[in-house]
């Protein structure tokens, strides 16, 4: 460790002497001024290009690769102009004076060209954060290589290590593993998205089976990517066995709910008790299942709200699935009339009113029965079938409004409670009848 620290100090001192010698030269300021001038011209050129070129309609008739290349070049116009101007300045100074007097221009030209290439390569990525991370990392490595300090930096990062069992953990190993994991996960995401699109396009599979296959493929590809990435940097997976006990304790203490929800999600997909598109009632919440995730399902209530229900709750609690085996739904309407009405006429009017609704199934005629001779009047139950439970409350409201109009037309009254209150005071009782409207 002392030798590594000594080497590092010598490297810092050598670099400081080189920079000091370069800054003390008058040619340094000339090169620096040319670089600043090139940066100003490049900035102005990019503003002019963007004001004159419509990015949305740029090269619309060109093939897709050329159109993509043209748009990237326009968006990186300042870098391209800056690199070109610095190269020209370097060429002129190289032939007009000693090559060492234009060293800074050469470094700036290489850095600008490296950034332009990196920008073109990373333009195929869609995630903005990944683009920035990859671009900055690649440009930093290119800068170290251009300055001739890449090997020294690599040796420095590999000189400090922590030994855990049979694993030698160094900053260089962590960086390599992180970079390879990022690349592997990116490739895994592309492969899993492709597989998902092909599975979803298959009409022979039910929605629940499709979701289950997609989850299995994603998990399998993720595991393969991690194993390949760790193996590529020289990490022996058997050396990580020391962490298995800690991971087990962590799952047992803090991650049991996550694991339970994950296993419950697999069970739900396997037994097909619920699937995307089902209309379910969970507790007081009713809605359509819009998505099934690893930890939860999303239930769209139809009013802009979405309920995120943990998978474990669907396995352990009561769930009403309105479309489990059949989407046909029985609508029940309870109502009452006074004793002046003809119960046979009431049942006939109710059945005709329900049958007239456009969503009532024609193959299953409505049925109305007299259920009770109550204190306040007769009670009836009207039932009819609709093909889908969506909007069941609206259908029920429509039928009740139409039934009200039919009762008004036939002179049938809906009963409301009547109470008698007798007040006794003085010699004679006073009887008072109070009607309480419904």
Image (cartoon, rainbow, N blue to C red):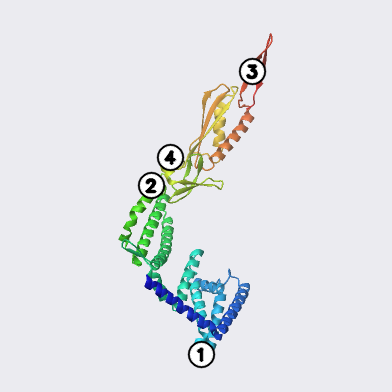
The C terminus - image quarter: top right
Task: Find numbered disc 2 in the image and state the secondary structure of the residue it sits on.
Answer: helix
Residue ID at (48%, 78%): 16
Q: How many marks?
A: 4
Mark 2 or mark 1: which comes first in sequence? 1
Task: Find numbered disc 3 in the image and state the secondary structure of the residue it sits on.
Answer: strand
Image x and y of residue 390, in percent: 52, 43
Residue ID at (56%, 85%): 26
Task: Find numbered disc 1 in the image and state the secondary structure of the residue it sits on.
Answer: loop
**Label 2 sits on residue:** 267
**Depth-wise, is mark 4 or mark 1 nearer the camera?**
1
Mark 4 or mark 2: which comes first in sequence? 2
Tag 2 and tag 1, C-beta contact below 8 Å: no
Tag 2 and tag 3, C-beta contact below 8 Å: no
Label 2 and label 1: CA atoms lie apart by: 75 Å
**Depth-wise, is mark 3 or mark 1 nearer the camera?**
1
- The circle on residue 421 is 3
Q: Is residue 402 above or below residue 92?
A: above
**Label 1 sits on residue:** 98
Image x and y of residue 404, in percent: 61, 32
The quadrant holding residue 357 is top right
Label 3 and label 1: CA atoms lie apart by: 118 Å
- The circle on residue 317 is 4
Task: Decide which of 177, 404 is in the foreground and name it.
Answer: 177
Mark 3 or mark 1: which comes first in sequence? 1
């Amino acid at each position: 460790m002392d030798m590594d620290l000594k080497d590092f100090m010598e490297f810092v001192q050598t670099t400081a002497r080189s920079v000091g010698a370069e800054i003390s030269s008058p040619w340094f300021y000339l090169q620096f001024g040319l670089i600043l001038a090139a940066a100003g011209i490049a900035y102005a050129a990019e503003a002019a290009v963007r004001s004159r070129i419509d990015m949305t309609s740029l090269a619309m008739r060109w093939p897709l690769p050329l159109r993509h290349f043209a748009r990237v070049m326009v968006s990186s116009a300042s870098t391209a102009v800056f690199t070109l101007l610095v190269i020209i300045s370097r060429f002129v100074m190289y032939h007009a004076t000693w090559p060492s007097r234009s060293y800074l221009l050469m470094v700036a030209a290489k850095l600008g060209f490296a950034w332009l290439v990196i920008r073109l390569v990373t333009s195929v990525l869609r995630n903005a954060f990944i683009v920035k991370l990859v671009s900055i990392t690649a440009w930093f490595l290119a800068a170290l290589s251009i300055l001739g300090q890449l090997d020294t930096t690599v040796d420095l990062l590999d000189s400090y290590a922590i030994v855990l069992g049979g694993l030698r953990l160094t900053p260089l190993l962590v960086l390599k593993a992180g970079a390879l994991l990022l690349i592997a996960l990116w490739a895994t995401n592309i492969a899993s998205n492709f597989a998902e699109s092909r599975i979803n396009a298959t009409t022979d599979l039910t929605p629940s089976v499709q979701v289950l296959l997609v989850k299995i493929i994603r998990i399998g590809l993720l595991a393969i990517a991690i194993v390949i990435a760790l193996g590529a940097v020289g990490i022996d997976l058997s050396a990580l066995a020391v962490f298995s006990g800690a991971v087990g304790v962590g799952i047992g203490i803090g991650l049991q709910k996550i694991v339970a929800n994950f296993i419950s999600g697999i069970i739900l997909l396997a037994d097909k008790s619920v699937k995307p598109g089902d209309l379910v009632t969970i507790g007081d919440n009713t809605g359509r299942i819009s998505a099934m995730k690893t930890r939860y399902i999303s239930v769209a209530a139809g009013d802009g709200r979405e309920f995120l229900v943990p998978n474990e709750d669907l396995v352990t609690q009561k769930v009403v699935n309105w479309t489990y085996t059949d989407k046909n739904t029985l609508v029940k309407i309870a109502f009452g009339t006074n004793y002046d009405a003809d119960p046979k006429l009431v049942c006939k009017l109710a059945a005709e009113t329900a049958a007239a609704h456009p969503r009532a199934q024609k193959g299953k005629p409505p049925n109305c029965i007299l259920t009770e001779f109550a204190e306040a009047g007769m009670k009836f139950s009207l039932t009819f079938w609709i093909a889908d439970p969506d909007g069941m409350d609206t259908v029920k409201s429509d039928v009740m409004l139409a039934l009200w109009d039919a009762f008004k037309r036939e002179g049938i009254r809906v009963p409301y409670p009547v109470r008698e209150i007798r007040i006794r005071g003085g010699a004679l009782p006073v009887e008072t009848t109070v009607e309480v409207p419904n």
